[in-house]
Amino acid sequence: MNPVQSPRVASTFPPPDGLVALPRNTLTVTFDHDMLEGDPTDPASVLNPANYALVGTTSSVAVADVAYDSATRTAVLTFNDLQADHYELRVKATIQSTDALALAEPYTLHFQALSDLSAQVRITFTQGRADARSQTVSYNMTVTNITSYDLLAPLVLYVDGLAPSVAAVLHGRPDLETGDWWLDLSSVVSGDRLHPGQTTAPMTITFSNPTGGRLNFPVGRPRPAVIPTPRPSSTRRRSRRPPWAKRIRIRLVPMIPMGRPWRTCSIPDPPE
């Protein structure tokens, strides 16, 4: 017979060193054993908010409530909306499994919460081209700061709802919860900020599509947007965004808090 073992944290969302888009007021912690529920005030209960601590670089966030799904062994932590910051989630070893064994060791998770910048940026796409052999579509992209204040680096471009499911943004990082993509723009920002009126250096954004089908970016409507694939031989420079760019939802977000009330930055849909 196998000896009874102490429980451990099996996974979390966000994952270790992950990125999450704001607004957000929940996190999840999944264990590898059935956990004790019982009285939420019991120090051994998985439902006790005191067994979790969420700490940012500027302030702590109180965990207001914990729900537990016994079928998936997942605790859902609820709190007030996060602010843009770097966070550390701590899970105490006082939590016990249904075998009355405490967590094998305290668990610590680090992640970043990213807030949308003001809509006062201009995103420009030029030189659309396709490579049939590698099944990719690429564009040159620049971002211009049209605010009256500096935008601090590093910056990240967020691409919503990329389809088909096997499509990807090359050199991007996937959001495991939503299937969306993050692309770091640090390499095209000169210095540590983008000044008012300043434009980034051109950056190539490349979409991989192994199926060879059309790329789709749902925009909250029953009919998804369809990206027309450029001809592989096309190298002419475009002076405006390609037609699909009016539909794709792209958001520019700062990776550190800016102390300003940010709003969603989206490329608008075309008129009906």
Image (cartoon, rainbow, N blue to C red):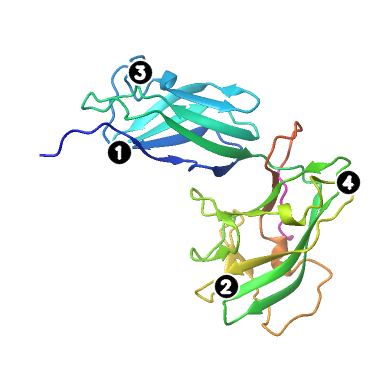
Q: Main secondary structure of the magenta part?
A: loop
Location of mark 1 (residue): 32
Name which quarter of the figure residue 60 lies in.
Answer: top right
Residue 85 falls within the magenta-colored stretch: no
Quadrant of the rendering where the N terminus is positioned? top left
Which comes before the other along the chain, label 1 or label 4?
Answer: 1
**Whole-number angstrom distance, CA of label 3 to CA of label 2:** 50 Å
Which comes before the other along the chain, label 2 or label 1?
Answer: 1
Location of mark 3 (residue): 40
| Mark 4 residue type | Pro
Magenta residue span: 264-270
Location of mark 2 (residue): 214
Q: Disc 1, disc 4: CB below 8 Å?
A: no
**Whole-number angstrom distance, CA of label 3 to CA of label 1:** 20 Å
**Whole-number angstrom distance, CA of label 3 to CA of label 4:** 51 Å
Which comes before the other along the chain, label 4 or label 2?
Answer: 4
**Whole-number angstrom distance, CA of label 4 to CA of label 2:** 36 Å
Decide if residue 267 is in sight here. no
Decide if residue 56 is in sight here. yes
Q: Which mark is residue 196?
A: 4
Q: Nearer the viewer, mark 4 or mark 2?
A: 4
